[in-house]
């Protein structure tokens, strides 16, 4: 979902950045099909402290054809929470939208949630996935009780997604049906959001309109 949100925003003319904050997540640059492209990645950003310049940082990131930029992981090295907070801040200073793939490390996740405007939780009708989802929501509510959040449920039908949302007391933001073209087990999967006509692009556009723009107007 983070890939589709960033690409959809870029296609609409926004300056957008996806930050991969989960070193064990497989790499957002792979989802963007940018793994072989040059540009700064997390190991390049961990060697110094202090304030990062926004636009010079963006100019050196891997960039998709859409114009979306990516701060990608390059291995399982942990990301210090303070550095994650500074990279998010630098990207926010120079762009219209920053999407962070929240890490599994609780300290780093807390750093991301502390500066977030909205939390979108992508889950699935699988018992293990739902347990992890409940843990993430509980943690987010404990440290940022006023943070707006909601569910996107993938690989299911509307009535099942509604049941999950009711049981969790979390608003349902959308349902994402399985798309064989996006299956990462294929030899050449499509980039999520690359096709403006795809279901994931339509959902991303709706989330940007209903959550991001609405939040900015309200604030």
Image (cartoon, rainbow, N blue to C red):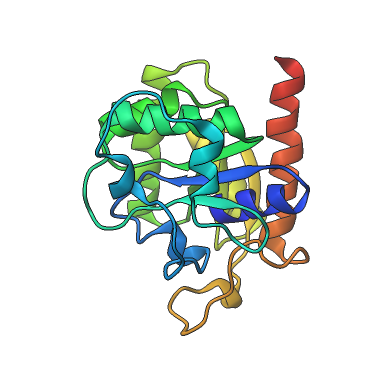
Q: Is residue 28 visible?
A: yes
Q: Is residue 118 visible?
A: no
Q: Nearer the viewer, residue 73 or 193?
A: 73
Q: Quadrant of residue 185?
A: bottom left
In the rendered image of this protein, does residue 204 appear above or below residue 117? below
Q: Nearer the viewer, residue 80 or 216?
A: 80
Kindly give the residue lying farthest to the left in the view shown.
77
Kindly give the residue lying farthest to the bottom in the view shown.
187
Residue, x 43% and y 27% (percent of image)? 113
Kindly give the residue lying farthest to the front in the view shown.
56
> Does residue 177 appear left or right of residue 84 in this picture?
right
Residue, x 58% and y 68% (percent of image)? 191
Residue, x 44% and y 18% (percent of image)? 144
> Does residue 21 appear left or right of residue 47 in this picture?
right
How many numbered marks are there?
A: 0
User: Can you give x and y, in whole percent of width and height, for residue 66 in the image?
Assistant: 68, 59
Quadrant in which the C terminus is drawn: top right
User: Can you give x and y, in whole percent of width and height, for residue 131 in the image?
Assistant: 34, 44
User: Can you give x and y, in whole percent of width and height, for residue 11 in the image?
Assistant: 74, 54
User: Can you give x and y, in whole percent of width and height, for residue 211 in the image?
Assistant: 69, 33
In the rendered image of this protein, does residue 29 appear above or below residue 214? below
Residue, x 56% and y 51% (percent of image)? 69
In the rendered image of this protein, does residue 195 appear above or below residue 124? below
């Amino acid at each position: 979902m983070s890939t589709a949100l960033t690409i959809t925003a870029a296609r609409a003319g926004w300056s957008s950045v996806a930050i991969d904050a989960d070193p064990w997540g497989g790499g957002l640059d792979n989802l963007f099909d940018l793994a072989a492209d040059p540009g700064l990645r997390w190991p390049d950003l961990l060697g110094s402290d202090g304030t990062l310049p926004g636009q010079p940082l963006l100019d050196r990131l891997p960039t998709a054809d859409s114009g979306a930029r990516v701060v990608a992981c390059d291995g399982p090295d942990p990301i210090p929470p303070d550095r994650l907070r500074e990279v998010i801040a630098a990207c926010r200073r120079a762009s219209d939208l920053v999407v962070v793939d929240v890490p599994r490390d609780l300290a780093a996740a807390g750093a991301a949630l502390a500066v977030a405007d909205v939390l979108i939780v992508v889950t699935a009708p699988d018992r293990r996935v739902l347990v992890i989802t409940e843990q993430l929501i509980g943690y987010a509510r404990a440290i940022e009780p006023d943070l707006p959040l909601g569910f996107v449920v993938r690989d299911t039908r509307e009535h099942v997604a509604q049941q999950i949302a009711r049981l969790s007391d979390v608003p349902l933001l959308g349902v994402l049906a399985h798309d064989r073209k996006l299956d990462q087990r294929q030899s050449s999967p499509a980039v999520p959001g690359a096709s403006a006509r795809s279901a994931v692009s339509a959902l991303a556009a709706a989330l940007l309109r209903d959550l991001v723009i609405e939040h900015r107007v309200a604030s």
